[in-house]
Image (cartoon, rainbow, N blue to C red):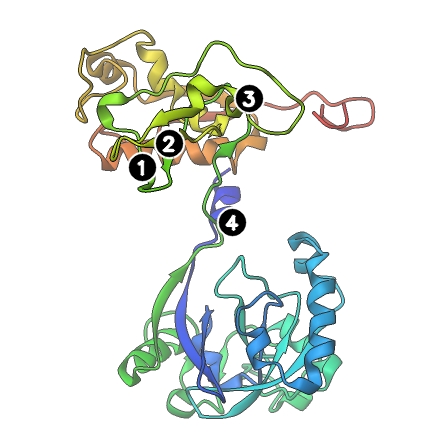
Amino acid sequence: VKVMQTNWIGRSEGAEVTFTTTEGDPIEIFTTRPDTLWGATFMVLAPEHELVDKVTSDGQRAEVDAYKAAAARLDEVARGAADKEKTGVFTGGFAINPVNDERIPIWIADYVMMGYGTGAIMAVPGHDQRDFEFAKKFDLPIRLVVQPPDSEVTSADDLSEAWPGEGVMINSGPINGIPAGKGEDESVKTTVQWLEAQGKGKGAVNYRMRDWLISRQRMWGTPIPMIFCDKCGTVPVPYEDLPVVLPDDAEFKPTGESPLRYHEGFRYVKCPQCGGDAERETDTMDTFMCSSWYPYAYVTPYWKKGEPLSPDDTPWDPEMGEYWLPVDQYTGGIEHATMHLLYFRFFAKAMRDLGIVNFDEPTQRLFNQGMILGPDGEKMSKSRG
């Protein structure tokens, strides 16, 4: 479970570096290997990147537009598959590499996506396999900047595949001769220090995990305490008016919208700021919002401290919580590793930071039981039965 969560979060240490187009527009990139900047021989933008239209030349416009349309029909899994044949289109534009002022071509390719990093990469085909395959297919230059140890490989012409491993930096200006690696006095940290000193970049941390979309079009969920006013915009429900209580009657229609949209008594309210006509948010929260903290509610499910509510209140009796929490033994399926269990842990850490609880993890032990499979070896599915 820990490995699955670590991979899902996808924490990466590296550097943020700004390339510029020949017209002067900045292109921000994040790289875990800033030491290979001197090996960047082209740039690749995601087809959805905001600069694609601007950097595309008139002669390449039709080809770029066709490629963008084709990429839009693919999902991220298909686009990111390691064995997918590399495709791409030259935009006709160029960028300037900030470490050596080299002019390099800008391509678009569907293996670069807006969901990770900045949607733009410096392509280092000598030391990244995807970039290597792309460069080989489109006859783009390959430069060796890490000399493999104890090897007869002395130039990019000797490579049959990218070299991602250790070695000594070559063809890399101020970091020539430094051991390639992420340790102290090795190439990555040395490059970050050099970039910061030169004002060309800075050390950074990136995450693969993205924001959680919690809104759902159903009635029975935690209400989202927001009100929409034409004059005041989005206004939070005042603390003294919490909790927002769902109605006990609703009309269910096959429209795909929340039944709360058709409940006039719930939907239409007065704006807390200006007193004018306004509407409640009628989506409710994802069920994982509730299951992320339900063990705390189980401690004293009917406990109510008193009126009015105060920001210092907790939704359970703190004395009972001190006795029962954190949970001693939590049993559940491993299929929850990167959803419920991740949110479960996040809530505990958020409440710890707020001073509501005094522990770091919501449970002391986790046990993942097995699954009962059908005759075909598959587990029960909501969609397939």
Q: How busy is the neighbourhood of tag 4: few (under 14 within 10 Å), some, or many (20 plus)?
A: some
Q: CA distance from mark 3 to mark 4?
A: 38 Å
Q: Position of residue 344 (x, y in %)?
A: 41, 30
Crowd around label 2: few <14 · some 14–19 · many ≥20 (10 Å): many
Q: Can residue 153 be seen at all in this image of the molecule?
A: yes
| Location of residue 70 in the rendering, given as x and y in whole percent from the top left corner | 74, 63
Say which element carries label 1.
strand
Q: Name the amino acid, label 3.
A: Pro
Instruction: Tell me the kind of residue under disc 1.
Output: Val
Q: CA distance from mark 4 to mark 2?
A: 43 Å
The numbered mark at residue 259 is: 3
Of the image marks 2 and 3, the number of the one nearer the N terminus? 3
Neighbor class of circle 3 (other Cα within 10 Å; few <14, some 14-19, many 20+) is many
In the image: residue 116, left or right of residue 254: left
Which SS class for mark 3? Answer: helix
Tag 2–tag 1 contact (CB < 8 Å): yes
Number of the front mark, 2 or 3: 2
Residue assigned mark 1 = 235
Which circle, 1 or 4, is nearer the viewer? 1
Residue beneath the point at 64% across and 20% down: 253
Vertical position of residue 358 compared to residue 213: above or below: above
Q: Measured along the vertical axis of the image, is residue 29 above or below residue 346?
A: below
- Sequence order check, earlier mark of 3 and 4: 4
Task: Name the residue tied to disc 2.
Answer: 278
Please identify the quarter of the rendering in which residue 132 is found.
bottom right
Left or right relative to 80: residue 297: left
Query: Under tag 2, what secondary structure?
Result: strand
Residue located beneath label 4 in the image: 7
Q: Are marks 4 and 2 in contact (CB under 8 Å)?
A: no
